[in-house]
């Protein structure tokens, strides 16, 4: 009988290497994408970088304190010529040109500390306001990236489900056509049908085989696209039941969605903040015409041990001795700077920022129009998708009834095998279109809320509540890594 440690080890092995039996749903994929998608990670880092604009702008208004010091060894050798009054005994002083050679060797140390406090700098206050707008813009851009990720996850998740259901329908059609071919061959052997019926059944079987190959390839491609967001492949996903989430676009109306988009669409919000930033940039450029006023204070100390040698070439004398010095210095004052003429640079910068401000206003106008257009389009698409889903659902039921009726017609001699093949093709098309329409409807619900700027993870969770049926999404025979 195995020991208790051995049993625990076996249980761990089963937990680590045993096959997974549960499917992955939309929320799980989204959570994995938030951790692994490179674009959302890039957006997050850009947001964090933009948040540093506020402390940088605020820090310029605080006292700036600095200190510096140095230790030096000085060797200086030179000469000088100057006028000097020379007195001779009994004669009045006369000016004479005196030539000196001078050599200095010294060790010197010094330090200085200073404080500077802004009293008036218009550009610094404007930069602080600009930083507030930039931080808000960064938050809006990051939220837009989050919404974009939710849209991409939904799109690719439902693309995989649509491809999986297309493959399943194609395989079922292939099985049906293969059975019909065998039945046609059997009936041909007993002389009930002609060879034309057999060849038509074989042609339908071959086309169905090609459709299965194409569907497998499509499923593999959509699976890789989903894995691009998360870095993982999924053998099984959850799909919705036949009933769909209750849609609220009809309850609110098209104009209500548009009005919400014009206020909350994140691209619009970011563009509005861009106009505010550009307006601040104009004021920052205009501050180049204004004076600045700073309070400053410094304190310092120095000490120098030196030996100096001086040679008077006129008198032929030479003097050597110490030339030590030391001292301290404390300074406090106000410094005002008034720009008078900068060669037209400041005026040019003002004009540049005015043009950029006008450009940002035009960008805002274009963004508003794009938000309105995309919201109206998403709203109408959702309505059309919902009606299309209902119509295609009935088309599938009707096609299934047609197939059964056609098969009975063949049995009583009223229909031919060609009619059965055509009915099965129509059923395959209806099933494929119905699956695609259901997932387009769900994806466009997400797109509509994103266009309005109100998409949240809770909205994905609401859709995810309908995803309860597992479906395999790893096609056999398709290359997988």
Image (spheres, rainbow, N blue to C red):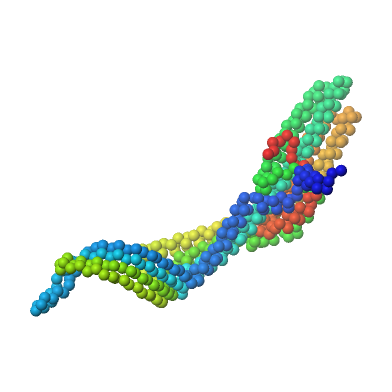
Residue 435 appears in the figure: no
Viewer-proximal residue among 214 and 132: 132
Q: How many marks?
A: 0
Task: Left or right? Give the position of 19 relative to 71.
Answer: right
Front residue (pair 297, 5): 5
In this rendering, is residue 463 above or below 319?
above
State the quadrant of the C terminus.
top right
Q: Position of residue 429 (x, y in %)?
A: 76, 38
Is residue 177 visible in the rendered image? The answer is: yes
On the rendered structure, is 323 left or right of 122?
left
Q: Quadrant of residue 396?
A: top right
Between 376 and 348, the one lying in front of the other is: 348
Q: Quadrant of the N terminus?
A: top right
Q: Residue at x 25, y 64 (%)?
A: 103
100 relative to 151 in the view: left or right: left
Residue 198 point in image, percent of width and height: 81, 24
Which residue is rendered at x = 36% and y = 71% of the image? 303
In this image, 313 relative to 427: left or right?
left
Residue 17 screen position, x and y as percent: 76, 43
Query: Which corner quadrant of the image does residue 52 belong to?
Result: bottom right
Image quadrant where residue 399 sits? top right
Residue drawn 82% across the image and 27% down it: 181
Q: Residue at x 20, y 67 (%)?
A: 318
Estimate the x, y position of residue 142 in percent, counting from the top left: 62, 57
Residue 88 vs 154, above or below: the answer is below
């Amino acid at each position: 009988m195995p020991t208790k440690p051995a049993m625990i080890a076996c249980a761990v092995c089963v937990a680590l290497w045993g096959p997974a039996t549960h499917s992955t749903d939309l929320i799980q994929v989204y959570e994995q994408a938030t951790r692994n998608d490179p674009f959302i990670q890039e957006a997050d880092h850009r947001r964090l970088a933009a948040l540093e604009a506020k402390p940088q702008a605020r820090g310029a208004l605080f006292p700036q304190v600095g200190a510096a010091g140095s230790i030096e060894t000085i060797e200086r050798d030179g000469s000088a010529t100057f006028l000097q009054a020379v007195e001779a005994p009994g004669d009045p002083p006369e000016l004479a040109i005196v030539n000196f050679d001078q050599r200095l060797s010294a060790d010197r140390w010094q330090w200085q500390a200073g404080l500077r406090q802004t009293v008036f700098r218009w550009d610094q206050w404007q930069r602080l306001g600009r930083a507030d707008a930039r931080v808000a813009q960064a938050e809006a851009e990051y939220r837009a990236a989050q919404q974009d990720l939710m849209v991409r996850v939904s799109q690719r998740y439902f693309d995989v489900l649509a491809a999986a259901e297309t493959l399943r329908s194609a395989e079922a059609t292939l099985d049906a056509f293969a059975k019909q071919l065998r039945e046609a061959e059997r009936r041909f052997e007993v002389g009930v049908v002609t060879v034309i019926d057999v060849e038509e059944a074989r042609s339908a079987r071959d086309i169905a085989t090609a459709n299965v190959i194409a569907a497998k390839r499509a499923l593999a491609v959509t699976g890789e696209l989903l894995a691009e967001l998360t870095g993982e492949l999924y053998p099984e996903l959850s799909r919705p039941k036949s009933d769909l989430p209750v849609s609220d676009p009809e309850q609110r109306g098209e104009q209500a969605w548009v009005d919400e988009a014009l206020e909350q669409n994140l691209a619009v919000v970011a563009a509005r903040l861009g106009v505010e930033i550009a307006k601040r940039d104009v004021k920052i450029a205009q501050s180049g015409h204004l004076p600045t006023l700073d309070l400053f204070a410094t304190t310092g100390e120095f000490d120098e041990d030196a030996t100096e040698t001086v040679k008077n070439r006129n008198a032929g004398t030479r003097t050597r001795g110490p030339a030590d010095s030391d001292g301290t210095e404390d300074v406090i004052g106000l410094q005002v700077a008034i720009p008078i003429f900068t060669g037209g640079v400041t005026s040019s910068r003002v004009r540049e920022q005015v043009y950029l401000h006008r450009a940002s206003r035009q960008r805002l106008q274009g963004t508003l129009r794009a938000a309105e257009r995309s919201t109206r389009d998403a709203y109408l698409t959702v309505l059309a998708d919902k009606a299309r889903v209902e119509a295609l659902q009935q088309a599938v039921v009707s096609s299934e009834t047609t197939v059964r009726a056609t098969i009975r017609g063949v049995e009583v001699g009223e229909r031919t095998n060609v009619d059965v093949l055509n009915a099965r093709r129509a059923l395959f098309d209806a099933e494929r279109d119905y699956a695609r329409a259901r997932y387009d409807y769900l994806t466009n619900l997400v797109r509509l809320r994103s266009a309005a700027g109100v998409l949240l993870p809770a909205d994905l969770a609401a859709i995810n509540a309908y995803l309860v049926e597992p479906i395999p999404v790893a096609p056999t025979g398709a290359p997988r890594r």
